[in-house]
Amino acid sequence: MRLFNIRSIIFIILLILSLALYFFTEARYAALLIVLLLLILIGALVIANVTGKQLRVSLVTPPQGMRGRPANVSIKVSNKSKLPVFLCRIKATCENLLTDERDEFDQFLSIGRKKDAVAGFLMKEDRCGCIHIHLEDVRVSDPLGLLNVKPGSLEIAEGGNGRIYFLPKATQSQIPPENLSSYDMESYQYSRLKSGNDPSEIFDIREYQTNDNIKAIHWKLTSKMDELMIKEFGLPIENKVMIIVDKSIAGKERKEERVEQATDFVSSLSFTLMQNTVNHTIGWYNYRNKEFQTFRVEDESSFWDAVRELISSPYREDAESAISRFIESDSNREFSSYIYVSEDDRDMERLMNYGAVSQYKPTEFK
């Protein structure tokens, strides 16, 4: 129970003043005022603790919204009790998981016995991002709002969580034609991590093991080593493209604007590759999950799935580069081409050890 809100403080002040009038003056009418205030307090205690015994609260959100346009959000409260709820206060928080912008709001409603009540409000978001809405607290109160009590047998559907995706722009990006065509060419690179069946490239040489193909015996080296040696053939890499997104610009000025600009650019870049039938993977370090995430984009459905995950992951200050996070992760590094979306030039040479690298700086594409 939370005893001290604005109304309860005013009520306590009135009670103290009434007691002072009664004990320090001859105004005996103050006794009636004291009795009346005590009866109101007792009534508030009874009502706040008896009502709201069987409440079910659910949050209804649209799957996605449009930037700059309001989205309808509803909070539905079902009262299964035979007693009405005179006043129900619901506290909720809204957080943009991409930009870390946060807001709080309260909703008040009354619910009849065995009735439903809905409190609706409009949410407008001017930036892209995943808006996570969470019902933080539910309290029932007396008609005067003196006492707030957490109801017994409270049921909150889906944990009181909801999400609205305000999607970024996805338009044709200004990728240089020569770069775009190179992503769709046949690759002549071989894996440095796995062996394959292409005899034109040697992956490794090792000692002979049972069931090895005798056609792979390295006869010259065998004669020198005086034991059977086997050639492991190379594995050609499919011409796959990896977009590495740097999410470490949180400490810079105009953070929200830069985050939005970078997200719009990455979405347009992936959209352009998808429209040109270039299958690719998008990856970034998720600072909430503490892991490097990757998502394969092959069609429009997988593109939007990746975008929704992209706008659900925040930007943070980071001493390590996104390239370092990628290389040190368990992510697959069998790509022939890498697109690095970042203002940071560090560790570019490390990434070049795994394939061709193109860097795009979102601030250069306005």
Image: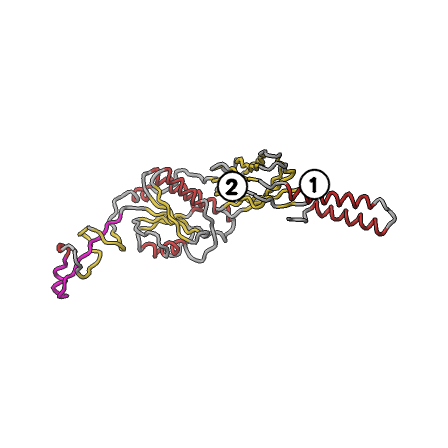
Do tag 2 and tag 1 residues touch (Cβ < 8 Å)? no
- Over which residues does the magenta segment extend? 217-237
**In terms of image quadrants, where is residue 209?**
bottom left
Residue drawn at the location 81% of the way across and 51% of the way down:
20
Q: Which residue is mark 2?
A: 157
Quadrant the C terminus occupies: top left
Q: How many marks?
A: 2
Q: Nearer the viewer, residue 362 or 101?
A: 101
Q: Is residue 168 above or below residue 333?
A: above
Q: Nearer the viewer, residue 214 or 332?
A: 214
Disc 2 secondary structure class: helix
Q: Residue at x 79, y 46 (%)?
A: 34
Identity, as a three-letter code, of the amino acid under mark 1: Leu
Quadrant for residue 106, please give it.
top right
Is residue 274 or residue 174 the one in the foreground? 274
Left or right: 339 in relation to 210: right
Residue to which mark 1 is pinned: 144
